[in-house]
Image (tube, rainbow, N blue to C red):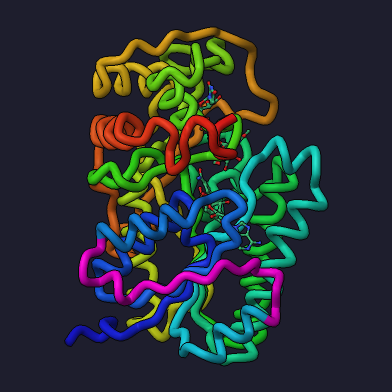
């Protein structure tokens, strides 16, 4: 029996987009997954479907509808189950909303992480994988971004990521029994190839591909392209899109390192593909995969957007032994498969998920 067969992983935010895909990969990889989510931006249906895809492994999946700031409830979970490690996805992620309502973000993202880490420490659980973001690189002068680049907060959302990264480094320096991996994600897109789970944002989608997907299924009339006067090949912004299943697998690789390497310390890794793709290139790839025309409205630049952002993946390849496998075509194919099977995500036209 492999070493990790019996490991129990607490996954905060496990009902969300990246969380649900990671929970599935955990179950398929022989781990036990204990999901804690307040369903603020997700649906329990995602968890049900993860169980369905996982088949017999679904018996290793437990779900608690709990807010991470509820220390009593969290303590109870840690008391009733021996947790070997935590993957911490839970948080709010809308950049514009964080500018409008910073206190909400400091409370939800920072206070909940503080509470989680306190509970982990008091139960002697000192292994953590945390969802950071490439937003901490701001608008770099050169690309690809390496993990050593200077860090900057472009919004209260980004600042919560920076502060939590710093907090993790402080905790490790104070107590070297901690093993912490901070993963800086680039732009996750796509869905599980089954088409049963995928991204289902509440309300107006802020990110490119959820918007494109809603245009394709007829929920929105056109995609607004934010700027076509950047110094890029076609003038539109360039990003490092990564298939969500590759991203999920990156977490399994991070866990393996934590369990197998006692010297893990507190380390940071980029998870991306190392390649840049423009908005128009993404739209063209999606049109090809879906056979749908995406009408475009060219608008001005979105405040706070960087021109070109993609990451170096050398450190993750070397130290996590992980590399993204899926292409842009795969990402669009799987995104369309999910969208066409679930045009209203986990909800229906009349549900609160649809605005
Ligand atoms: P998501 O909104 O789909 O998932 C987050 C989950 O956390 C949701 O299910 C939500 O209900 C839950 N949650 C939020 N606050 C909570 C709380 N206080 N207690 C319990 N549960 C709570 O988002 P996602 O895209 O899956 O992102 C996961 C993580 O990755 C987030 O931390 C996000 O900031 C980070 N990230 C995402 C992206 C991206 O483009 N999706 C990029 C970089 C980093
Ligand atoms: C955005 C956030 C970033 C966050 C990331 C993941 C901003 C300024 N940045 O990054 O902090 O970590 O999401 O949640 O919000 N685009 C359009 N039309 C759209 C949507 C996007 O043209 O309707 C363009 C953008 O200008 C950009 C590209 O598509 O060039 C990707 O945008 P998006 O998916 O929002 O990701 P990021 O900007 O990388």
Q: 239 or 249, which lies in front?
A: 249
The percent coordinates of residue 335 (x first, y second) are 33, 34
- Decide which of 291, 113 is in the foreground and name it: 291
Residue found 70% across the figure and 40% down from its top? 154
Q: Nearer the viewer, residue 62 or 166?
A: 62
Relative height, residue 25 to residue 152 (above, below): below
- Magenta stretch contains residue 330: no
63 vs 254, left or right, is right
Give the residues in magenta. Answer: 54-72
- Residue 144 seen in this snapshot: no
Q: Is residue 59 magenta?
A: yes
Q: Quadrant of ligand 2?
A: top right
Q: Residue at x 23, y 46 (%)?
A: 194
In the image: residue 188, left or right of residue 64? left
Kindly indicate the quadrant of the structure image that contains residue 71: bottom right
Q: Quadrant of residue 199?
A: top left
Location of residue 300 with respect to 40 vertically, above or below: above
- Locate the N terminus by quadrant: bottom left
Q: Position of residue 275 (x, y in %)?
A: 35, 36
């Amino acid at each position: 029996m492999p070493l990790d067969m019996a490991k129990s992983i607490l996954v905060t935010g496990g009902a969300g987009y990246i969380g649900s895909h990671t929970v599935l990969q955990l179950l398929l990889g022989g781990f036990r997954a204990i999901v804690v989510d307040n369903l603020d931006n997700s649906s329990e249906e995602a968890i049900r479907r993860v169980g369905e895809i996982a088949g017999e492994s679904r018996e290793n999946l437990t779900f608690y509808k709990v807010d991470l700031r509820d220390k009593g409830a969290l303590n109870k979970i840690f008391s009733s189950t021996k947790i070997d490690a935590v993957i911490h996805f839970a948080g709010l992620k809308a950049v514009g909303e964080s500018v409008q309502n910073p206190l909400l973000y400091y409370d939800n993202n920072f206070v909940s992480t503080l509470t989680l880490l306190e509970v982990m420490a008091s139960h002697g659980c000192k292994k953590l994988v945390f969802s950071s973001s490439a937003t901490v690189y701001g608008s770099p002068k050169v690309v690809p971004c390496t993990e050593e680049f200077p860090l900057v907060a472009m919004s209260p959302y980004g600042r919560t990521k920076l502060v939590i990264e710093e907090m993790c480094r402080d905790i490790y320096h104070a107590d070297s029994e901690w093993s912490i991996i901070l993963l800086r994600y680039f732009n996750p897109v796509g869905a599980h190839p089954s088409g049963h789970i995928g991204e289902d944002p509440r309300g107006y989608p802020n990110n490119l591909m959820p918007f494109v997907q809603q245009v394709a299924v007829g929920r929105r009339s056109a995609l607004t392209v934010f700027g076509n006067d950047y110094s890029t090949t076609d003038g539109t912004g360039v990003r490092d899109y990564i298939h969500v299943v590759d991203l999920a697998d990156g977490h399994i690789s991070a866990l393996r390192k934590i369990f197998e390497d006692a010297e893990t310390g507190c380390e940071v890794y980029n998870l991306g593909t190392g390649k840049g793709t423009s908005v128009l290139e993404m739209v063209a790839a999606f049109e090809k995969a879906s056979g749908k025309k995406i009408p475009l409205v060219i608008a001005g630049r979105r405040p706070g957007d960087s021109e070109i952002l993609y990451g170096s993946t050398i450190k993750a390849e070397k130290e996590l032994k992980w590399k993204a496998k899926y292409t842009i075509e795969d990402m669009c194919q799987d995104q369309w498969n999910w969208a066409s099977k679930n045009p209203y995500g986990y909800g229906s036209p009349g549900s609160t998920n649809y605005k």
